């Protein structure tokens, strides 16, 4: 039976999926953050509109990839209101000394030390405000230039290239680093060394510290004995110096301070937003279908007015709601489904149902006639069969009940508009850092734009092969998680950014807690397989965790907690020595063989493409030297007479760093919660080594 079932043609699979109402999942857009810079600081608020388009540079071989901002960016006009110093950097400040100059004379004030005792954990707080607060959003994501005037001829004793301090901003729940790169601090850790070398006067001109504020930058109110202070909080903390890092011999001092906004950062998605598209004119008949001009269509968002409006012949406007299907739609419900891949929009069909179904419905209504819930339902939500008398219908009336309208039909002559929708997505949106630099339309006062982080998360539309594997799990669990396999399936369905999910056994967790090991999905087609994938690239982000937990919230038993974590990754470095035929002893041939073997090794020792079946190295499975020998045999490398030597070196993470074993092993065991991976790092010596001999 299984053999015959596996012989079912794909066209039958497609019909089965359509009968079940299963649609292929649309592509997912890549996400990144765009930073806009102004030509100069402006006296008034500057707004970057929502859906501002920024693209990569178009070339002869590569088309431009367009990203659109997810919301409006406001670049405000910040002002410094308080200067505070403290002995200890607290999570929620309660102790400080107010150093605010009299009459708010920030341009020039008495020499003020920044660190009270010039000891680690001293800090200085800056409290900002914005006259145009605009509901506390005008400084979110802003790029600030903090101009600091230092005291003349003051020696601090630090290394200007490696100062022991960090800049942070309060993001609403924690302190977040805001100094992007060390070169953004022109004061060089308040040493003003560049001014001394250039002969300039740091007291008169000052130097800038460029800070990239978080997009969740929010005002806060902290209280101390001297009173409470509200505003936007930024601080600079004196860190504990490293082993070879000089410390401050004395506290740096400043005599002037000012701040200005020079840009801002906002999230963006790889898509193009289309507004007010006319789908067509209604004929007044059931089952009408229209098609959007651009496809695929990304997931619609109600908060961005991505829905359909119907303009009636009378001039009235109706806002319709999108649904997955018409199963629960009555004849007066303003519903429509959208096929994200094809862009097809359908309105309510008129279905002719069998008389037996009508009779069974009547019988069921009679059995439920005593329930008040039926009587309390709104007529708009009722089945047409339910709005009639609860007595059995005579046979003559059954013919009138054979047709049922699912969803309202737009009246004749009504104009149908899609208010807004977004098209795009796919793995091509995973562009590298600083590739997005072309503004599609000019914006006043904006000089340039870039993305400091690579775009991630873009995935292509679901293939039929993937759907064939997904649907059996969907039918088996029915969107609920009970046994470990159910939790794994539901976690994978929560987001297409989840490649693998492993549920730990009862012995590996505590009662009432389900622990899942999550391996994120990465764009395999864009991976450089000559270098592999480092474990840091499989980091479980907070946004992905939130998406999974939110999806699983209604699909798990009550009282069960779900905890997500990363597997314990273990690295493998392979040393391989091959004996070649004399005719293959050329530099070009050896280089080609080395490239082929390295690519195969990095693919083989990988959580996503590893193992003998190419679907990912199994959780907890060790790798043996015989596995590497078997891989080489399957490659059928030309000119290779013998595999002379295979050595495995283990890489483990301790604290914040990775360490490589100096002793070769016959196997590398990642542990029961571990996954094997391999990547290139010349400093760590994690790369594979291929040697050739006669």
Image: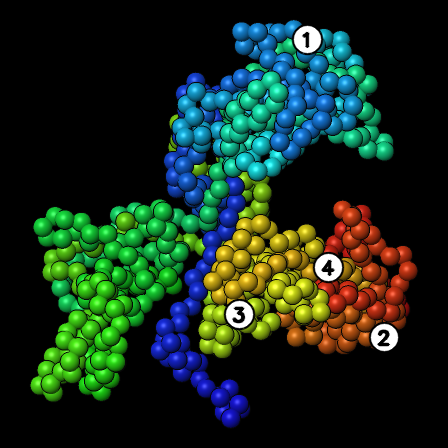
Q: Say whether marks 4 and 1 touch (CB < 8 Å).
A: no
- Which numbered disc covers residue 559? none
Inter-mark Cα distance, 4 to 3:
27 Å
Q: Which residue is mark 3?
A: 481
- Residue 569 is labelled as 4
**Looking at the image, can residue 27 be seen?**
yes
The reply to whether callout 3 and callout 1 are in contact (CB within 8 Å) is: no
Question: Is residue 430 among what the camera can see?
Answer: no
Considering only order in the chain, which callout, 2 or 4, is on the residue closer to the N terminus?
Answer: 4
> Which class describes the residues within 10 Å of circle 1: few (<14), some (14-19), or many (20+)?
some
Q: CA distance from mark 2 to mark 3?
A: 51 Å
The CA distance from mark 3 to mark 1 is 64 Å
Q: Residue at 82% of width from left, 60% of height from top?
A: 650
- In the image, residue 76 above or below residue 33: above
Which secondary structure, mark 1?
loop
Which numbered mark, 4 or 3, is in the foreground of this view? 3
């Amino acid at each position: 039976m299984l053999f015959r079932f596996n012989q079912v043609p794909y066209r039958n699979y497609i019909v089965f999926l359509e009968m079940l109402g299963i649609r292929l999942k649309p592509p997912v857009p890549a996400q990144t953050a765009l930073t806009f810079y102004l030509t100069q600081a402006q006296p008034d608020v500057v707004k970057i509109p929502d859906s501002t388009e920024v693209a990569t540079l178009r070339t002869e071989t590569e088309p431009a990839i367009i990203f659109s901002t997810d919301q409006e960016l406001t670049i405000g006009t910040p002002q410094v209101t308080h200067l505070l110093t403290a002995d200890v950097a607290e999570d929620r400040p309660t102790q400080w000394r107010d150093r605010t100059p009299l009459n708010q004379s920030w341009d020039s004030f008495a020499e003020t030390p920044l660190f009270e005792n010039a000891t680690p954990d001293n800090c200085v707080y800056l409290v900002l405000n914005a006259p145009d607060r605009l509901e506390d959003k005008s400084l979110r994501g802003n790029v600030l230039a903090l101009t600091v005037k230092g005291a003349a001829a003051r020696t601090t004793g630090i290394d200007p290239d490696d100062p022991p301090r960090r800049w942070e901003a309060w993001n609403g729940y924690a302190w977040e680093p805001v100094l992007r790169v060390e070169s953004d601090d022109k004061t060089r850790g308040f040493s003003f060394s560049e001014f001394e070398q250039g002969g300039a006067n740091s007291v008169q001109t000052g130097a800038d510290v460029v800070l990239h504020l978080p997009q969740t930058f929010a005002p806060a109110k902290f209280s101390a004995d001297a009173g409470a202070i509200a505003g936007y909080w930024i601080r600079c903390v004196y860190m504990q110096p490293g082993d070879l890092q000089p410390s401050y011999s004395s506290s740096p001092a400043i005599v002037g301070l000012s701040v200005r906004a020079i840009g801002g950062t906002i999230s963006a998605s790889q898509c193009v937003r289309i507004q007010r598209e006319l789908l067509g004119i209604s004929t007044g008949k059931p089952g009408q279908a229209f098609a959007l001009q651009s496809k695929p269509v990304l997931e619609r968002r109600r908060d961005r007015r991505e829905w359909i409006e119907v303009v009636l012949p009378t001039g009235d406007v109706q806002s319709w709601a999108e649904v997955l299907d018409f199963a629960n739609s009555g004849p007066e419900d303003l519903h429509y489904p959208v096929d994200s891949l094809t862009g097809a929009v359908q309105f309510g069909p008129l279905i002719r149902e069998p008389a037996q179904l009508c009779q069974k419905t009547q019988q069921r209504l009679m059995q439920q006639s005593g329930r008040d819930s039926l009587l309390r339902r709104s007529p708009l939500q009722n089945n047409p069969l339910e709005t009639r008398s609860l007595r059995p219908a005579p046979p003559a009336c059954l013919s009138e009940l054979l047709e049922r309208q699912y969803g309202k039909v737009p009246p004749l002559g009504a104009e149908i508009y899609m208010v807004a929708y977004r098209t795009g997505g796919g793995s091509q949106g995973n562009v590298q850092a600083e590739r997005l630099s072309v503004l599609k339309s000019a914006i006043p006062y904006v000089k340039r734009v870039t993305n400091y982080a690579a775009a991630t998360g873009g995935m292509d539309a679901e293939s039929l092969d993937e759907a064939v594997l997904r649907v059996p799990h969907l039918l088996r669990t029915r969107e609920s998680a009970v046994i470990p396999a159910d939790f794994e399936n539901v976690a994978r369905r929560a987001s297409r950014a989840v490649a693998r999910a492993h549920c730990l056994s009862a012995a590996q967790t505590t009662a009432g807690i389900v622990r899942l090991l999550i391996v994120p999905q990465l764009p395999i087609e864009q991976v450089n397989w000559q270098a592999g994938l480092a474990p840091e690239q499989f980091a479980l982000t907070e946004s992905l965790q939130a998406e999974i937990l939110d999806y699983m919230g209604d699909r798990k038993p009550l009282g069960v907690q779900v905890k997500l974590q990363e597997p314990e990754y273990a690295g493998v470095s392979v040393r391989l020595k091959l004996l070649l035929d004399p005719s293959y002893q050329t530099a070009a041939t050896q280089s080609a063989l080395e490239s082929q073997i390295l690519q195969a090794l990095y693919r083989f020792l990988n959580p996503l493409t590893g193992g003998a079946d190419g679907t990912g190295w199994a959780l907890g499975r060790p790798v043996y030297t015989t596995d590497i020998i078997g891989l080489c045999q399957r490659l059928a490398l030309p000119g290779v007479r013998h595999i002379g030597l295979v050595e495995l070196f283990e890489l483990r993470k301790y604290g914040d760093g990775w360490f490589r074993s100096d002793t070769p092993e016959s196997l590398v065991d990642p542990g029961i919660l571990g996954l094997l991976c391999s990547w290139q790092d010349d400093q760590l010596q994690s790369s594979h080594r291929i040697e050739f001999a006669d």
